[in-house]
Image (cartoon, rainbow, N blue to C red):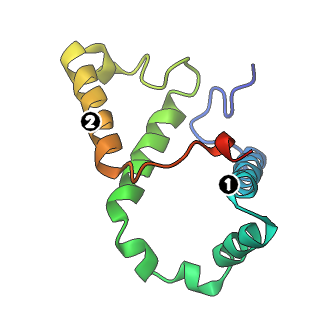
Amino acid sequence: TDTVAEGRILPTLKEVCQMAVTFGLVVFGWILFRAENITHAWSYVSGIFSSSFFIYSHVVGSRFTLVLVGVFMLIEWFGRGNQYAIEKMDFAKKKYFRWAIYYAIVFCIFQFGGKEQQFIYFQF
């Protein structure tokens, strides 16, 4: 399998563009599958690209979430060559620290998980 930026810390501009396109297509695919109809999906997409979306006040309330996403992205990026992201990281070798990470992840899931939702494929 090909690993992005194998042997390098940062990807090339081409690889960054490829990752951005893949991420964008997947996210828009989720919008299409999750929306009740095309009109509903279009309202989501138009909301994403509206100028009000990029106002700073939308981001202020979710700084902690942005920090968590950044931390998880860094962990995944540096562990991208392994089967699991923290598999070969030095801090994960100590059993007590690894379990502390697991408990922190479970805590974040319960704390920020949101309300219960119906499984997406039950719509079809």
Which mark, by number, is residue 18? Answer: none
Q: Where 43 falls versus 109 (above or below)?
A: below
Query: Based on the displayed image, in which of its 4 quarters is residue 63 positioned?
Result: bottom left
Query: Based on the displayed image, in which of its 4 quarters is residue 5 positioned?
Result: top right
Q: Are marks 1 and 2 in contact (CB under 8 Å)?
A: no
* The N terminus lies in quadrant: top right
* The C terminus lies in quadrant: top right
Please give the residue where the numbered disc 1 appears in the rendered image.
34
Give the secondary structure at mark 2: helix
Residue at the far left: name it.
Answer: 96
Query: Based on the displayed image, in which of its 4 quarters is residue 88 positioned?
Result: top left
How crowded pointer 1 is (Cα within 10 Å; few <14, some 14-19, many 20+) is rated as some
Residue type pointed to by label 2: Ala
Query: Is 122 left, or right, of 42 in this rendering?
Result: left
Q: Position of residue 29 (x, y in %)?
A: 75, 52
Q: Position of residue 101 (x, y in %)?
A: 28, 29
Residue at position x 44%, y 35% in the image: 75
Please give the residue where the numbered disc 2 appears in the rendered image.
104
Residue at position x 23%, y 14% in the image: 95
Residue type pointed to by label 1: Arg
Give the secondary structure at mark 1: helix
Q: Position of residue 89 (x, y in %)?
A: 39, 21
Q: Earlier in the sequence, mark 1 or mark 2?
A: 1
Q: Where 46 falls versus 71 (above or below)?
A: below
Residue at position x 65%, y 73% in the image: 48
